Image: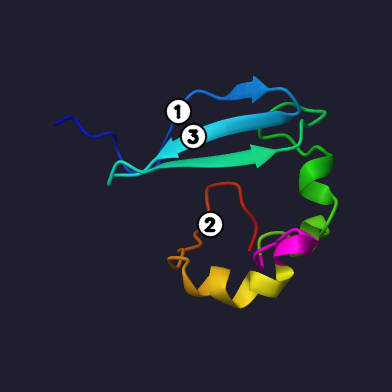
């Protein structure tokens, strides 16, 4: 069986009001993430990313819609830890 590399990003598609992209993990899972259409295209700094937290604090915690806040503890308990690393050009 041919496996894709860990977290290979598959083609990005716009489906109605959503931008959808799939990431196929090494185990064969496909994860869908639906985002609002962004003014600057997929991966841009459109309104969906800057509405609920300022740029200087982005990525410090999991942002959830208000209707999921009651389940925050259960959601976070089921997430795998992530390793944050700086890339060339990033500032500490």
Say if mark 2 contacts mark 3, CB within 8 Å: no
Q: Is residue 63 magenta?
A: yes
Residue at the spot of label 3:
22
Say if mark 2 contacts mark 1, CB within 8 Å: no
Residue found 85% across the figure and 51% down from its top: 51
Spatial distance from mark 2 to mark 1, Cα to Cα?
A: 23 Å
Q: Locate residue 50, reporting x and y percent.
A: 82, 49
Classify mark 3: residues with Cα within 10 Å, few (<14), some (14-19) or many (20+). some
Q: Which disc number belongs to residue 86? A: 2
- Magenta stretch in the rendered image: 60-68
Q: Is residue 87 magenta?
A: no
Q: Locate residue 70, reporting x and y percent.
A: 70, 73
Quadrant where the N terminus lies? top left
Name the quadrant containing residue 33: top right
Overall secondary structure of the magenta stretch?
loop
Residue at the spot of label 1:
10
Q: Locate residue 75, reporting x and y percent.
A: 56, 68
Residue found 49% across the figure and 34% down from its top: 22
Q: Is residue 59 above or below residue 36?
A: below
Residue found 28% across the figure and 34% down from its top: 4
Give the label, 2 or 1, closer to the camera: 1
């Amino acid at each position: 069986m041919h496996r894709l590399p860990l977290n290979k990003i598959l083609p990005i598609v716009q489906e109605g009001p959503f931008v959808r992209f799939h990431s196929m993990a090494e185990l064969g899972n496909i994860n869908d993430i639906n985002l609002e259409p962004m003014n600057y295209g997929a991966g841009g700094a459109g309104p969906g990313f800057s509405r609920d937290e300022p740029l200087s604090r982005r990525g410090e915690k999991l942002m959830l819609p208000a209707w999921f806040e009651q389940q925050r503890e259960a959601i976070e308990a089921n997430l795998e830890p992530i390793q944050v690393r700086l890339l060339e050009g990033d500032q500490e």
